Image (cartoon, rainbow, N blue to C red):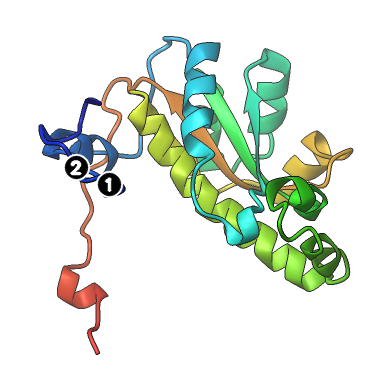
Amino acid sequence: MSAGLPDRESPSGEPAALDAGARALLFTEARTANTFTDEAVSEAQLHELVELAKWPPTSANTNPLRILFVRSVEARARLVSHMSDGNKAKTQTAPMVAVLAADMEFYEHIPRLLPFRPELREVFAADEALRERQALFNATLQAGYFILAVRAVGLAAGPMGGFDRDGVDSDFFLDRPWRSILVVNVGHPGIEPWFDRLPRFSYDEMTLEI
């Protein structure tokens, strides 16, 4: 039995529910980290979290998310130069930083990823607006799973949207069809890493039933 699953056997094909501890780790007690220790994030941890993050549903299984891990001093300095002022120090000091991007040529992989509908490659190739919309939507969906995967392997995530996307793309992705969507600091939480928990909407405020 996997850690975090209830002590029961689920019927064949029926997913078992996560226990309270696992739900807290991923959702209710999870927070956005603003400071980190200097403990390094290992290559094994990066592989582990990517192996988890690759499983969300995407339209036609297109999987457009691409990840740039920025570890070197030189690359980190370049990335920091594109961050908004409030995010520069956090990005400079995090043990690992991931730039999440959408591959705008995701459709080239459709024959491999959706082998029973290879003709969809031509549909996306012929419609720039459609492929841009699908790339950005699905990569953003995958980015949410990436954050959950960071938490699932025992690390903290600090996602940030405050950066110059055009600057990042021209600096890091000039020879690739990738467009940055999010920068995520990754590591072990440091001194006073969390802000106070901010409010959330209630069930009744978020939902309708018809």
Which residue carries the number 1 mark? 15
17 left or right of 77 in image: left
Q: Going 42% across and 31% down the picture, which residue do you hit?
A: 150
Under mark 1, the amino acid is Pro
* Residue 175: x %, y % from top left: 89, 38
Per the rendering, the mark at residue 2 is: none
Which residue carries the number 2 mark? 10
Whether residue 90 is visible: no
Quadrant of res 204: bottom left
Q: Going 60% across and 52% down the picture, which residue do you hit?
A: 139
Q: Quadrant of the N terminus?
A: top left
Under mark 2, the amino acid is Ser
Name the residue furthest bottom. Answer: 210
Quadrant of res 16: top left
Q: 10 Å neighbourhood of mark 2: few (<14), some, or many (≥20)?
A: few
Above or below 96: residue 112? below
Give the CA separation, mark 1 to mark 2. 7 Å
163 left or right of 175 in image: left
> Is the residue under label 2 in contact with that under label 1 (CB below 8 Å)?
yes
Q: Report helix, strand or loop for mark 2.
A: loop
